[in-house]
Image (tube, rainbow, N blue to C red):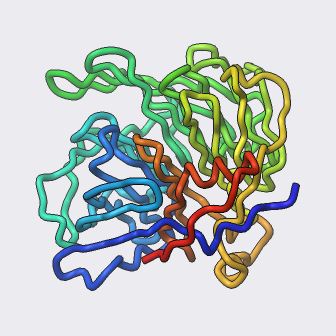
Amino acid sequence: MTSIDVSDHAARLAFTGADTGGLPDLGRTEDCRFSPDGRLLLVAGYAAQSIAVFRVAGTGPGKLHLDGMAWLSHPRMNHPHGVDFIDARTIAIANRKGRLSVHSLPDTAFDGRRHTAPMRANIRRAVRGEPMKTPGSIAVIGRGPGRYDLLACLNYRHAMTLQSMQHRFGLHIRRGGRIVLEAGLAIPDGVSVCRATGRVAISNHNEHAVRLYPSADSLTPEAEPCGRLTGAGYPHGLRFFDNGRALMVADAGAPLVHLYRDPEARWQGERAPLASFRVMDEATFAAGHYNPQEGGPKGIDIDPSEHLMLVTSEHQQLAAFDLAALRRLAEGRGAPTSGAAG
């Protein structure tokens, strides 16, 4: 499929903040995540050994205004790769060279400085007797008031682990997680759980495909996917939207983001992208394309209002795109409005 070049049509990204001098250098960025209310944005600073947290002043069609940022650090953050919100004040981090950790968001000024994020839990075991190895991306699944599951990719263990926690009157991690999926996985490098339908999507790096499952409850170590998405070279971050009827996939080995669509949100069988969008120019892609698996976008998220798609990578650390414009392009209904990225 021919890609649609939108690299010159990034949404207007405005950044203001005391003593920052504009958008800071984030280094190599991996997964990113808006808070459920859209007021905060987390970006995993892999090389910075920290999480960048931005205060979101506003979003809209074609614009993202970030009003200040801070770095969140802790000695247990070891190459943070994946991040998600547990609730408005608590986050879970997948540390590629460490463990799964849970941290409180400190009350802090968004002043560009480094602040300690108090650790609530450090999950050291994938299952009883087996250490947590190479956790990558993570998805938090709400299970009712104060109850959550953490579904995480164990990249080079080629498996998915699930950890259960209670967070109402203090934080309690149930002892002994479990491996919930192994069959067919070859470097699972991204995970998304649809809030509307419960569907689970997993980027399977070495298969060059995304695997889809009916729900987290349907996962067993030998479970086979109900659907597969092809067309991505090295799928990485991915995100459901439109009530589970659409899915965006970042392609780490190409300057592309792929759009897939299932009007019934069932995601059965095999399907190719509805459209592929080139989100970075050739020079930016070439700067990181030192092997076939790198150079393209890594993290991806869509803001709660579904105005914007956000992508992150080492050489395009933070870029936003007008989601409605991308959907119009995919349906052949016109070009996006050009804007300046800041």
- Is any atom of residue 98 visible in this view? no
Question: Would residue 222 be found to the left or right of residue 250 on screen?
Answer: right
Regarding residue 330, the answer to whether it shows in the image is: yes
* Residue at figure coordinates x 86%, y 60% from the top left: 2
Q: Is residue 298 left or right of residue 158?
A: left
Quadrant showing the N terminus: bottom right
Report the front residue among 238 and 59. 59
Q: Residue at x 62, y 75 (%)?
A: 8
Q: Image height check: is 81 above or below 341?
A: above
Front in this rendered view, residue 190 or 103: 190
The furthest residue to the front? 333
Q: Where is residue 244 shown, x and y percent of the image?
A: 59, 28
**Residue drawn at (35%, 71%), measured in percent from left and top?**
14
Q: Residue 185, image x and y in percent?
A: 74, 37
Dividing the picture into quadrants, the one containing residue 256 is: bottom right
- Name the residue nearer the viewer: 160 or 332: 332
Q: Position of residue 50 (x, y in %)?
A: 35, 63
Q: Position of residue 281 (x, y in %)?
A: 68, 77
Quadrant containing the C terminus is: bottom left
**Please, is residue 147 above or below residue 152 in the view?**
above
Number of numbered discs on residues: 0
1 w.r.t. 207: above or below: below
Quadrant in the picture for residue 4:
bottom right
Residue that appears at 43% across and 32% down:
140
